[in-house]
Amino acid sequence: MNILVTGSDGQLGRALRRASVASSDRYFFTDVAGNDTLRLDITDADAVEGFVREHGIGVIVNCAAYTNVDCAEDDAARAELLNATAVKHLARSMKGVGGLLVHVSTDYVFGGDPYNTPCREEQKGSPTGVYGVTKLHGEEAIRSVGCRHVIFRTAWLYSEDGKNFVKTMLRLTEEKEELKVVFDQAGTPTYAGDLAGAIYTILEERKYDGCEGTYHYSDEGVCSWYDFAKAIAEYAGHRRCDIQPCHSDEFPSKVKRPSYSVLDKTKFKKTFGIAIPYWTDSLRKCIANIAKEK
């Protein structure tokens, strides 16, 4: 089977590149820049259609997205283009060949309504900012096109690659003697390697057959950003930094982030039978990998 992966220079794309090295399927890793991958601009419908036809693509894994939550507030058109319009191009290309679209969405489709229990797949989206709205539009575009699809909503993604909360905290807790981190936003850190491994297993073992739909995937457990930062510092041995909890309003932002966006993963586990790691175990692994690269 020929599989197209978009956004391959990002955190999840790179993790999927590592996960799929032994696959018997043929992967085509692409990105808009095409630095060390094939170049493909998914906002160009003709380019997407041409790539799919030329390479006989049967599955697309869409790891591409506009993910800068704050910048999206001033760049709504670009966010909509990448997170919704381009997604519709991918869906139409798969609809045309009877293929499967695996799309990665976000916990930010929730947040407008107050939750105190894990969010389920069928809950109505209530995003609080442009990023969440455009990601919800992307999901809706896939369903409206009607292609075979599996949508994975995930949360608080981090890895050894690129810019993310873990790498930022590793730097700040090493440089600073004191740090404030919000404690009134709860969710689940998710290691990109875990999500990539789950996607790879589902594709490799053809677990998606008859299981199209929307699923939640994050690592197990729940914490605040403050708890997350404390764990990062502890596992890295950065004990000199005094990390203190603070309220979100102490860090004014253009967008209100979800105060509780824990994802219920019951449907994923029952459907695919894939074990999900606890967030602290995966965090230790990631930090150890980063340390080895220094």
Image: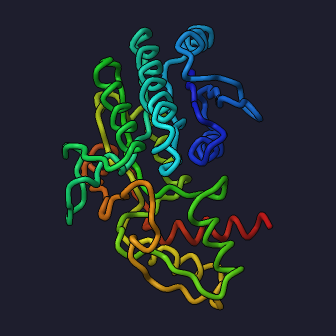
Horizontal side of 140 relative to 13 (left or right) equals left
Residue 5 to residue 216: above or below: above
Q: What residue sits 59% from the left and 35% below the top?
A: 7
Which quarter of the figure is the N terminus placed in? top right
Residue 105 to residue 175: above or below: above
Horizontal side of 97 relative to 125 (left or right) equals right
Q: Position of residue 30 (x, y in %)?
A: 65, 29
Q: What residue sits 50% from the left and 26% below the top?
A: 60
Q: Which quadrant would residue 178 be assigned to in this image? A: bottom right
Q: Which quadrant would residue 38 be assigned to in this image? A: top right
> In this rendering, does residue 183 appear at all?
yes
Residue 246 to residue 111: above or below: below
What is the basis of the colouring in this image?
rainbow
> In this rendering, does residue 268 appear at all?
no
Which quarter of the figure is the C terminus placed in? bottom right
Q: Position of residue 224 (x, y in %)?
A: 39, 72
The residue lying toward the viewer, choosing from 264 and 115, is: 115
Q: What residue sits 24% from the left and 54% below the top?
A: 119
Q: Position of residue 130 (x, y in %)?
A: 40, 42
Q: How many marks?
A: 0
Q: What residue sits 35% from the left and 68% below the top?
A: 186
Q: Position of residue 26 (x, y in %)?
A: 62, 25
